Image (cartoon, helix red, strand yellow):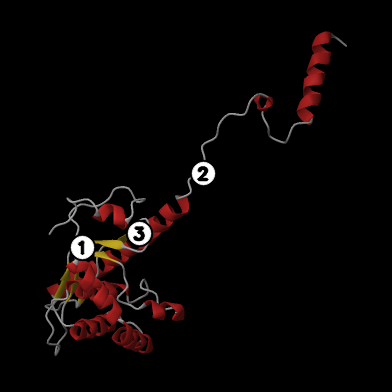
Amino acid sequence: MSFATRRRAALLSGLALLPHGLPVRAAAASQPQTPPDPNKEKRELIRRANAQWEAEYKKIEAATKAAEKRGEFSSLAPPKSLVPFKDWDYYYTRGISLWKPNAGQTFKAVGVPDGFVTDLTSIPQGLWSFGIRPEGPYAYAAIIHDFLYWMQDRTREEADEIFLAAMADSKVEESLKNRIYNGVRVGGGSAWKKNAALKKGGEKRILKKFPKDFTITWAEWKARPDVFRD
């Protein structure tokens, strides 16, 4: 056997001992690898959630325009998306959310501006343990309710009644709608008082500038003086 043949046989023998698929260069110092993105799953979750929300928004928007052509109107128009801050305790809306009173209702219309920041706590957390989360089928109505609880330019009682009407407009199941409404009437006072204290302390909730970095928290963003409308 020639030297070249023996050398080739030795190399093949050595490769047979290496892990399957490992290149020859692996015997040298390993190359640094890019660490996995810990936020990849969260990014994908937000992307899917907002894609679904935007699809629903487009359907409702189309139905609203069709109704207006017939001389009718939609009582509830949701925002285009709800975007979380890093802590996932606070969210901001993109697009205007609107609720209009139905026939026989004496309430004034409610318009939630683009960039309203909410913590979705006007639904008491005591209800969450029963599966009544803020992001359920009543989410659009909850944003209207949260805005009224923040502005407090109407009574709490009226805000709760509008919430009940908006849930009906969202076709929330009757028993669930009534459970949420009763829970809000009993436990919503703490959210009302909390918002009053925050407003008195100077907190603002309507953005004119939006974060481009999804890892920023609400506490960090609201500390910037030039991000609010008012």
Choose top left, top right, bottom left or bottom right for residue 148: bottom left
Vertical position of residue 64 compared to residue 166: above or below: above
Q: Residue at x 26, y 84 (%)?
A: 164
**Dot 1 lies on which element?**
loop
Query: Residue 5 placed where, x, y %?
Result: 82, 14
Vertical position of residue 196 compared to residue 228: above or below: below
Give the Cα separation between the discs numbered 1 and 2. 37 Å
The residue that disc 3 covers is 51
Query: Residue 97 placed where, x, y %?
Result: 21, 68
The residue that disc 2 covers is 36
Residue flagged by tag 1: what amino acid is it? Glu
Task: Answer with left or right where residue 41 lies relative to residue 216.
Answer: right
Q: Earlier in the sequence, mark 3 or mark 1?
A: 3
Mark nearest the camera among 1 and 2 is 1
For the residues labelled 3 and 1, say whether their Cβ atoms are less than 8 Å apart.
no
One can see residue 43 in this view: yes
Residue flagged by tag 2: what amino acid is it? Pro
Q: Residue at x 20, y 52 (%)?
A: 209
The residue that disc 1 covers is 203
**Dot 2 lies on which element?**
loop
Q: Earlier in the sequence, mark 1 or mark 2?
A: 2
Query: Residue 84 placed where, x, y %?
Result: 34, 59
